[in-house]
């Protein structure tokens, strides 16, 4: 008998080339005043016009906030929230990578809830609904457009943590692959590996359900077949579109099944060393898979086939090994950092990193094999 599962999804998802043109009619549903939180790279890449023109043509008043840094600080979300509140905005649009979308999601709830972003890092601490949230991803990675999380960094103590809860779920996601064409090769590679990590961790999560498995499987297939092309031929709209669909599906999978030990071990890399989220996940993925393999060989065998490896009638543990080789080879082909030492992270930091990782409890609980402090240190050592 199947165990009871529940599956939640953002109510409206608009996907396809030119989808940004629908932003005006989407935002108008919630009122006439909009805070647009936008990644500075979007302004630099001259992509602001396709975002603001549809809003203006619907007669909306747009307030633009573009001071978003990668792995954003809680104070950045506080500032965006202040503007949304003072300008009496009805909705917040987040257009950019996960960093801009997460600032936008936090701003939307800070506009209606007292206090600061840091007061709400945790689970279900946000008590009142926020402003309407419309998310427009411009990297194919985080899936933040369909998750109930806003991940923000703190300086003291140095850490990253999510504001998690039902009021963080966006009302609308608008995905236009044309907005991802300008993402540079290395960011395409690391964000794409982030999406693949989401899909694989959701698929092997102890919270996985038939519905999350369906989206995770399709995501693995799409990312495996398109990430190399998206990195090496950035102008290839088909590959970009397939990657954006893959990251969307992977985001839907983690919103329901959660993530695993890769994320728990990656958090200290971001919190203490400011390593970008996708870089940290992409680096650790194959090492954590190697550790996990005895706990989920059958599912890794599926991953191997989804990544295009051949099935010669081999046993699951042989195929599972092929999934790890496929992930390793993909990382090499797209030239992501493969070793902690490349990021100047030394062995002496491992005990402290492992202590921080142990605090990321929910992903560890979802992981198909138990990871304690010793195991975490051993995985970091493999990745050194
Ligand atoms: P990012 O948003 O920091 O963007 C990476 C870089 O790409 C930035 O320099 C940005 O300016 C640039 N960029 C973005 N779009 C571009 C475009 N179209 N053209 C050119 N450059 C572009 O990176 P990310 O990986 O998308 O997001 C990372 C953040 O998201 C982290 O803080 C991470 O913790 C968080 N995250 C959130 C969730 C969630 O569910 N909320 C899930 C995973 C990760």
Image (tube, rainbow, N blue to C red):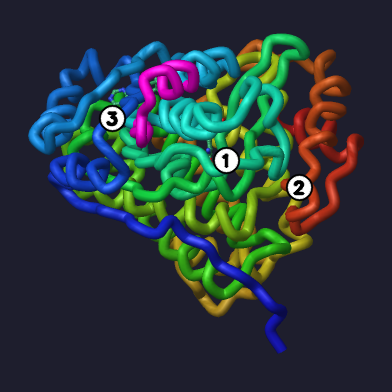
Query: Residue 127 occupies which quadrant of the picture?
Result: top right
Is 83 magenta? The answer is yes
Q: Is residue 190 visible?
A: no
Secondary structure state at the residue bearing disc 2:
helix
Q: Is residue 207 above or below residue 60?
A: below
Find disc 2 in the rendering and name its residue.
362
Find disc 3 in the rendering and name its residue.
33
Find disc 1 in the rendering and name its residue.
149
Q: Residue at x 68, y 22 (%)?
A: 118
Q: Residue at x 40, y 40 (%)?
A: 133
Query: Tag 2 or tag 3, which sits nearer the N-term?
Result: 3
Q: Position of residue 87 (x, y in %)?
A: 36, 20
Q: Residue at x 83, y 34 (%)?
A: 359
Quadrant where ligand 1 appears: top left
Question: What distance separates the C-alpha of mark 3 from that of mark 2?
Answer: 37 Å
Q: Residues within 10 Å of mark 2 (few under 14, many from 20)?
A: some
Query: Tag 2 or tag 1, which sits nearer the N-term?
Result: 1
Q: Is 381 left or right of 190, judged from the image as shown?
A: right
The quarter in which the N terminus is drawn is: bottom right
């Amino acid at each position: 008998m199947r165990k009871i599962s529940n599956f939640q999804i953002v109510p409206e998802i608009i996907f396809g080339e030119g989808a940004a043109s629908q932003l005006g009619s989407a935002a108008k549903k919630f009122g006439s005043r909009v805070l647009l939180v936008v990644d500075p790279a979007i302004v630099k890449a001259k992509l602001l016009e396709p975002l603001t023109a549809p809003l203006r043509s619907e007669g909306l008043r747009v307030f633009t906030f573009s001071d978003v840094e990668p792995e954003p600080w809680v104070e950045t979300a506080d500032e965006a929230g202040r503007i949304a509140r003072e300008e009496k905005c009805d909705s917040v649009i987040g257009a950019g990578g996960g960093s801009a979308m997460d600032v936008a999601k936090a701003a939307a709830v800070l506009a209606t809830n007292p206090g600061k972003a840091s007061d709400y890092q945790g689970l279900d601490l946000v008590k009142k609904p926020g402003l309407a949230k419309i998310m427009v991803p411009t990297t194919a990675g985080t899936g933040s457009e369909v998750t109930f999380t806003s991940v923000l960094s703190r300086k003291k103590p140095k850490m990253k943590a999510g504001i998690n809860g039902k009021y963080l779920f966006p009302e609308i996601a608008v995905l236009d692959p044309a907005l991802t064409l300008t993402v540079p090769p290395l960011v395409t590679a690391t964000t794409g590996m982030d999406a693949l990590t989401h899909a694989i961790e959701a698929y092997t999560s102890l919270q996985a359900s038939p519905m999350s498995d369906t989206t995770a499987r399709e995501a693995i297939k799409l990312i495996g077949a398109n990430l190399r092309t998206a990195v090496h031929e950035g102008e290839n709209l088909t590959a970009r579109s397939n990657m954006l669909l893959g990251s969307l599906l992977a985001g839907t999978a983690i919103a329901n099944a959660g993530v695993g030990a890769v994320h728990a071990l990656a958090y200290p890399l971001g919190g203490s060393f400011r390593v970008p989220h996708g870089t940290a996940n992409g680096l650790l993925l194959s090492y954590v898979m190697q550790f996990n393999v005895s706990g989920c060989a059958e599912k890794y065998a599926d991953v191997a086939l989804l990544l295009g490896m051949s099935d010669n009638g081999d046993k699951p543990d042989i195929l599972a090994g092929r999934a790890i080789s496929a992930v390793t080879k993909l990382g090499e082909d797209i030239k992501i950092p493969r070793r902690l030492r490349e990021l100047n992270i030394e062995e002496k930091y491992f005990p402290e990193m492992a202590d921080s990782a142990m605090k990321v409890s929910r992903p560890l609980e979802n992981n198909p094999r138990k990871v304690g402090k010793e195991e975490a240190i051993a995985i970091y050592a493999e990745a050194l």
